[in-house]
Amino acid sequence: MEKLIISEQDIVNAICIYLSRKYQARPEEIEVELIFDDEEEDGFSAEAFVGGQKQKLLTIHIIEALRLWIDEVLNKDPLAAGIKLLFDEDEGIIAAIH
């Protein structure tokens, strides 16, 4: 797969799609906040609100959501993609796909 940068908004969209499948909700009903903490081991997480319930997502869940997004939105092989989450001062949390 060619190298690609996934924006913070697309990561949020991917998580909304991922959680909509998991909780039988519409993606637009889900609120997501991405979190970067350089003192944490993984550094990346997210909090989502689905049907009034708060969900904590770890890095592995964000990667799973991105793999679903790569498959369904980009129509690419999600297992062939190497995914690395990065923090960019200007862009926020992004994903490098290669």
Image: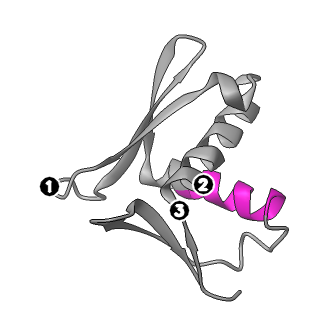
Q: As shown in the figure, which amino acid type bears the numbered disc 1?
A: Glu
Residue linked to disc 2: 10
Amino acid at dot 3? Ser
User: Residue 83's quadrant in the figure?
Assistant: bottom right
What kind of secondary structure does the magenta stretch mostly adopt?
A: helix
Region rendered in magenta? 63-73
Give the image location of residue 79, x and y in percent.
Answer: 71, 72
Residue 12, position as x, y percentages in the image: 55, 46
The residue wearing badge 3 is 7
Real-space Cα separation, disc 2 to disc 3, in angstroms: 5 Å
Give the percent coordinates (x, y) of residue 1: 71, 86
| Mark 2, other Cα within 10 Å: few <14 / some 14–19 / many ≥20 | some
Judging from the image, what secondary structure is the residue with disc 2 in? helix
Return the residue found at the far top: 52
* Above or below for 25 versus 19: above
SS of the residue under disc 1: loop
Query: The disc labelled 2 sits on which kind of residue?
Result: Asp
Image-based side of 75 in relation to 3, left or right? right
> Mark 3 or mark 1: which is in front?
3
Which residue is drawn at the image coordinates 63% and 51% (left, top)? 65
- The numbered disc on residue 39 is 1
Sequence-first disc among 2 and 1: 2
Looking at the image, residue 74 lies above or below residue 24? below
